[in-house]
Amino acid sequence: MVLGTIICIIFYFQILVNDAKLMQSNFLNKSNITTRNHTAPGAVIVEIQNIFDNQISHRNNKLLTQFSGQYREISSISATNYSTHEYMLEEILFLITTHARRILTTIHFLKFWATRPGINCLIVFHEKDFMNYTNITDFLLQQGVLCEIQTSPVERYEQRYFELFYDGWKKQESDSHQNERRRIQWFAVGDDDTIWFVNNLLHVLRQYNSSDAIYLGNTSTKKFILKRHGAFFGYGGAGILLSRSLALSYVQHRQQCDRFYASFGGDEMIGKCVVEELGVNLTREHHFHQMDHYGNMLGMLESGVNGLVTLHHMSSHWKPYPILNMNNTEEAVRRLNTAYSIFDKSFLKRYFYVNHDTNQSVLLTMGHSVSVVNRILTTEDLSMVERTWCCDEMIDRSFRPEETNKTTWYFQQLINETCIDGIRYEMIYERTVGSNDQYSSIKVAFSLSRSPD
Ligand SMILES: *[C@@H]1O[C@H](CO)[C@@H](O)[C@H](O)[C@H]1NC(C)=O
Ligand SMILES: *[C@@H]1O[C@H](CO)[C@@H](O)[C@H](O)[C@H]1NC(C)=O
Ligand SMILES: *[C@@H]1O[C@H](CO)[C@@H](O)[C@H](O)[C@H]1NC(C)=O
Ligand SMILES: *[C@@H]1O[C@H](CO)[C@@H](O)[C@H](O)[C@H]1NC(C)=O
Ligand SMILES: *[C@@H]1O[C@H](CO)[C@@H](O)[C@H](O)[C@H]1NC(C)=O
Ligand SMILES: *[C@@H]1O[C@H](CO)[C@@H](O)[C@H](O)[C@H]1NC(C)=O
Ligand SMILES: *[C@@H]1O[C@H](CO)[C@@H](O)[C@H](O)[C@H]1NC(C)=O
Ligand SMILES: *[C@@H]1O[C@H](CO)[C@@H](O)[C@H](O)[C@H]1NC(C)=O
Ligand SMILES: *[C@@H]1O[C@H](CO)[C@@H](O)[C@H](O)[C@H]1NC(C)=O
Ligand SMILES: *[C@@H]1O[C@H](CO)[C@@H](O)[C@H](O)[C@H]1NC(C)=O
Ligand SMILES: *[C@@H]1O[C@H](CO)[C@@H](O)[C@H](O)[C@H]1NC(C)=O
Ligand SMILES: CC(=O)N[C@H]1CO[C@H](CO)[C@@H](O)[C@@H]1O
């Protein structure tokens, strides 16, 4: 099912013409569609229904024509070239270090990416910490986490973090005799609460050559944090990648880099070693998200960040689904995982609709939210981040004030997916848990189809 979806998304990018119901809606009819010549690339048909009593197939479902129509695709904030080389999942080694006790709370984040078949990953514990929790191995297996576990005599967390690239290099050396061709090309370090969107990472890596010395990541977007820690290094929560060539050089300069052990964080030590000792600067990638802001990150998630490679600090700083009014990290991560498995590269892609009669705009962010704003958003508005969170600016994006009259529904589940002449998804987006007020849940039918020509 997922594979079919990916194929459909890649190949079919024109208007759907074969849904009889849509022809009768008041803004599109057959004559409109045929004279349009199917030349609207990126246009999709979206039909929204109000679901009464949360019954998905209730016969009183009401078509919300004011929100339904031909939606326009909005391009992502960062386009990339993707030309050099296509890497395979097996060519990346993911590395983390943590405390055994912490795993119990961060397990959901780990499960998001480390349960994927074919993943190479290594978790390093302090040996004494591990001795007290030897049952952690069974626990991780039970949770489906496929990482190898190692212990280290290094007690200080920051230093173990810094040494992850050495541990990773050693591991791949001892593994590589098994399969020379599949040797590791990229070494990826993240925090234990970093979520990796692995397919998107593979996509981003296509523009780089692991034979070049590449240090990939990004900083925080929070001014205060940058002031305190600096902006020269890749922040660990956002994820850090070293190309094979740079990782080798890192390992060879281990002694010279000892002098950075006193630095604040493991990610900063790595940065100092790479920048000061190895003379390689950080290559900044828009898709790596340290996420240091607190509160409601809806504005950021609705700002065109599809293709994202990492998210961090979920639950501790912000919640992806504010409707889950319990601190339900497990359910939030499960929903994100469902949405990303279904929509893949299109997860968080935006589609936009304006109803000039009612002066409303609708923004559909795939797999995350549907927001109705009671004004007409401009192209400029859509390029900015709506400032829904608390207090600080986001240094690398321009932003606009929080909307005063906006209603948002959040992705709950996919209820149907068909892929015959194109792709059609039926999804439920919900507003508040257990509320029976008007429009508390909506069904969104999304159709993307190939031109019949
Ligand atoms: C489509 O719209 C045009 C113009 O609004 C109208 O003349 C025509 O009758 C409509 N066709 C159908 C099938 O509703
Ligand atoms: C439709 O496409 C044909 C050829 O591709 C072109 O000649 C014609 O002008 C187009 N019609 C419209 C309305 O764009
Ligand atoms: C994409 O390719 C163009 C032309 O080849 C180049 O100028 C540009 O820097 C490339 N962008 C990235 C992100 O590599
Ligand atoms: C291991 O457990 C013992 C006994 O509870 C405790 O004293 C010690 O500090 C623990 N060691 C670590 C590294 O957590
Ligand atoms: C592992 O054992 C410790 C006691 O040694 C216990 O507190 C903890 O809950 C166990 N963890 C799991 C995941 O079973
Ligand atoms: C990557 O770089 C190496 C060394 O510079 C070069 O031999 C190789 O052709 C490059 N690969 C690609 C796909 O450009
Ligand atoms: C790294 O960046 C600094 C400025 O921050 C610049 O002076 C230096 O030339 C850069 N080094 C390389 C190798 O690009
Ligand atoms: C992340 O990387 C992009 C370049 O791709 C850059 O424009 C942006 O400012 C970076 N973010 C931060 C917080 O530095
Ligand atoms: C949810 O977590 C926040 C902070 O993490 C806490 O203040 C709040 O009391 C928690 N709410 C519930 C219902 O547990
Ligand atoms: C929000 O917009 C709706 C529809 O335009 C309007 O009925 C309502 O009064 C507005 N609410 C506020 C608080 O402005
Ligand atoms: C899914 O959608 C297709 C096409 O709209 C429809 O034929 C099929 O009956 C639907 N399946 C379910 C289970 O609703
Ligand atoms: C044939 C035709 O173009 N019909 C209608 C298409 O839609 C626009 C506005 O949505 C109408 O103005 C046209 O009359």
Image (cartoon, rainbow, N blue to C red):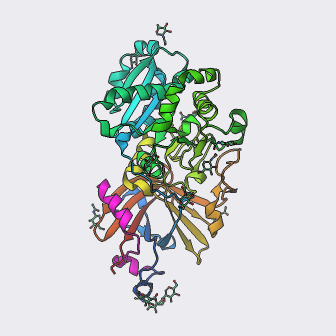
Camera sees residue 194: no
- Residue 239 x %, y %: 52, 38
Q: Which residue is depicted at the point 39% across and 51% down?
A: 86
Image side of residue 1 versus residue 281, left or right = left
Residue 22 counted in the magenta span = yes
- Residue 163 x %, y %: 51, 24
Q: Which residue is depicted at the point 43% across and 29% down?
A: 168
Which corner quadrant of the figure contains ligand 3?
bottom right
- Give the magenta range: 1-25
- Residue 327 x %, y %: 51, 37
Q: Which residue is depicted at the point 32% across and 54% down?
A: 2
Residue 448 counted in the magenta span = no
Q: Work out whether 264 lies above or below 311.
A: above
Camera sees residue 166: yes
Q: Quadrant of residue 142?
A: top left
Image side of residue 148 versus residue 248, left or right = left
Q: How many marks?
A: 0
436 or 148: nearer the viewer: 148
Q: Quadrant of residue 197?
A: top left
Q: Work out whether 190 lies above or below 429.
A: above
Q: Quadrant of residue 228?
A: top right
